Image (spheres, grey):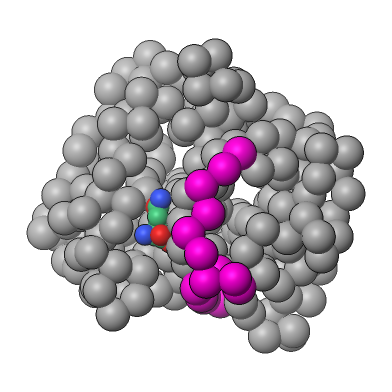
Amino acid sequence: MKSAVILFPGTNRENDAIAALEQASGSKPQLVWHGETELPKVDLIMIPGGFSYGDYLRSGAMAGKSPVMRAVADQAKAGVSIIGVCNGFQILTETHLLPGALMRNAHLKFICKRAALKIENAETRFTSKYDAGQVVKYPVAHHDGNYFADSETLDRLEGEGRVALRYCDDDGVVAPETNLNGSQRNIAGILNEKGNVLGMMPHPENAIDPLHGGIDGRGLFSSMVEALS
Ligand SMILES: NC(=O)CC[C@H](N)C(=O)O
């Protein structure tokens, strides 16, 4: 699987993304700067986390208007797989490659902790190595993770199996108390209509080494390698 990692001023998880992609695929991703208008020919584009443009205006708003995102949108339309994590998810909603928006966390605090997540759909190119309903733990680190979409959009996402992950407890119970940040219907990650674009707030790339405290994130990267190699 050939991959590229997009870099903006303020991105800070690129090395974690590179490590996870390299561990799973055996090859180093190419780094692409935000001012580029063309992308290398790859199977997967990853937009990592961070504080692109210092989160000015809104998290991901300025990055969403950058030259490279026009190229990413073209690749998404052409069927190339795209994964956006945390700030990457925010950038994908700002670019309208994914519906909805990520608002300030409901309690207005930055959250930095390990979160339990329920795999809602294991029949995607990003999650096939997991079982449906499986509980995984990935770290979260964000202040704008509160997923919002209107109820018609939410119903469509659910009806089409496009909710990839939800915040839950260790037993997989999805409830208001297990909703970390106020997201509608506990949503932590969604897919686009074609299923080739995934955005998610938690960080699977920070759960790939026992030193991270867990390796649950590996399944996501190995799913992509299996589907895209
Ligand atoms: N870790 C991240 O990518 C953070 C995303 C964004 N800057 C936020 O705090 O919501």
* Quadrant position of the N terminus in the picture: top left
- Examine the structure image and report whether residue 104 is included in the region drawn in magenta: yes
- Examine the structure image and report whether residue 36 is included in the region drawn in magenta: no
Corner quadrant of residue 8: bottom left
User: In front: 212, or 205?
Assistant: 212
Give above or below for 62 relative to 53: below
Q: Is residue 198 visible?
A: no
Which segment did they paint magenta? 99-114
Corner quadrant of residue 137: top right
Picture quadrant of ligand 1: bottom left
Instruction: Judge from the rendering whether residue 160 lies leftward or rightward of residue 65; answer left or right.
Output: right
How far across and how far down the image is residue 165, in percent? Answer: 70, 50
How far across and how far down the image is residue 89, in percent? Answer: 46, 59
Q: Residue at x 76, y 68 (%)?
A: 185
User: In front: 39, or 221?
Assistant: 221
Q: Residue at x 50, y 22 (%)?
A: 212
Instruction: Judge from the rendering whether residue 150 lies leftward or rightward of residue 1; answer left or right.
Output: right
Q: Is residue 43 visible?
A: yes
Q: Residue at x 59, y 71 (%)?
A: 107
How far across and how far down the image is residue 49, in percent? Answer: 37, 49
How far across and how far down the image is residue 80, in percent? Answer: 42, 48
Give above or below for 169 relative to 212: below
Give above or below for 199 relative to 137: below
Corner quadrant of residue 147: bottom right
Instruction: Judge from the rendering whether residue 122 lies leftward or rightward of residue 104; answer left or right.
Output: right
Q: Residue at x 25, y 60 (%)?
A: 52
